[in-house]
Image (tube, helix red, strand yellow):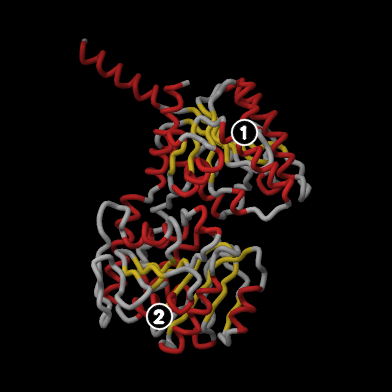
Amino acid sequence: MPRTSNIMNHASRITQSRLKLFYINYADLSVAYGATVCIVELAKALTQQGHKVTVIVPAFRKNAVPSHASRLTHYAFEVVPIPNWDVRFLRKVWFYLASFVWVTLLAWRRRPDILYWGEMTYTITPYLVRKLTGIPYAIIAHGFAPDELRVSRWRMALVKWCQKVYFGNADVIITVTPKIADRIHEVYGVPRERLVPIENGVNLERFKPMDKNEVRQKLGLPETYTYIGWVGYFFPWSGVETLLRAAKRVLAEVPEARFIVVGHGVWGTHLTDEAKALGLRVCTLSGFKDGVQPLPDPATWEVCFTGEVANELVPLFINAWDIATAPYPGGRNEKSGGSSMKIREYFGCGVPVVTTDVAGIGTRWLVGIDDGGDAETRSSGEAEKRGSGEVKGSKLMIGERGVVVPPDDPEAFAEGLMVLLRDSALRSQMGRAARQFAEQHCSWDEVARQTARAFEGVRRKA
């Protein structure tokens, strides 16, 4: 009898620990980019851990569903699409207004434990819903708008007022970097105990090491070349220009190097024009949205721009590379830090990385300073190393999982690439360490556990 009682008490504790939450975001889940990948992966991981997750998003034309209670069967969690006014400059404002009504009504009916809001720029909707429903709310901050937006003075004043209200009244704020937490504390005076940095994760089942020879055969990439790659969305703060300028220097010494740029973005032909202006031989493709096909013969190009690639195909490209890159510039990235999705994906695939030493990206991820030990030093041939992992007489830092260089410095970036190009054994060693690090620290399961712990603290206080 006592044993039965203990089992029932244990089951009761498990049930009590399960959360029921609404996860509200302005996002089109039919399109796979950084923000939507984060939403879907976190919601999936929380659901797999036994929590009940309802994702609430606008009903864009691509993912519109007839009934607000319909379940989109390709997700493991419920998705409630809110009817949205599909007018370019009014979509987001309309969602702010519509979500106020819909979330309030759904919250009254279903009584979730917590409302988890993606950051909203020009509204205090999270605060208003809390006042009407009495349900605690959390905010996730992927950046810090006052450091990133380039808007008029009155619009910035509105942004800061809205953020002061919804950050100031939030029960907990999840930030994807410690730097963002620092900025919210400094600017709005939010107590440190309500700021919880939890960095993004990576799907380790999708982004995993594959047989390099098989992948290259699928992509039509001969073994006679060494491949260096970048993947992402073209933003001004992605730093691809630094990679292109470094490529010019690398090719002068290693003519068999080939650079593959995977992605698309807001800059149109700016980057291909930049590559051509540098005198690089360029291949421009229309993308890989439905399947893989061989790339043109690398003898005809030095830099290949693939165009948009379906998210499920990205691991193939990463696994084809010898070196992956993340040449983040300074400026914006220095202020808010970075929670680099691409570096996690590179790590998951077991590929060494060359990146820049901006806040929250470089030394913390590649060198190992923040994971409980000093940076290890590696042999790169001729270079003498110091105990910090820096190369004496150089701007480089050789880490456990890659090489770190100063931002906005193409010559240093080229030097970092050359360290790995000259040493295949070092590349293999770093690649193994990168995958191990991803398994230990970067899974979405771990992100979900940390997020649930933060929410449990809110629920206990409610």
Using the image, determine if residue 61 lies above or below residue 190: below
Query: Residue flagged by tag 2: what amino acid is it?
Result: Thr
User: In screen coordinates, is 13 left or right of 331?
Assistant: left
**Callout 1 secondary element:** helix
Q: Residue at x 35, y 62 (%)?
A: 366
**Residue at image mark 1:** 165
Can the viewer see residue 78?
no
**Callout 2 secondary element:** strand
**Circle 2 crowding by C-alpha within 10 Å: few under 14, some 14–19, many from 20:** some
**Residue at image mark 2:** 226
Q: Residue furthest right?
A: 87
Residue 434 picture location, percent across and down: 33, 61
Q: How far apart in space, not on screen, are marks 2 and 1 (Cα)?
A: 52 Å
Which image quadrant is residue 71 in? top right
Query: Residue flagged by tag 1: what amino acid is it?
Result: Val
Q: Earlier in the sequence, mark 2 or mark 1?
A: 1
Q: Residue at x 58, y 80 (%)?
A: 275
Q: Residue at x 55, y 21 (%)?
A: 111
Can the viewer see residue 129?
yes
**Circle 1 crowding by C-alpha within 10 Å: few under 14, some 14–19, many from 20:** some
Using the image, determine if residue 327 lies above or below residue 152: below
Which image quadrant is residue 270 in? bottom right
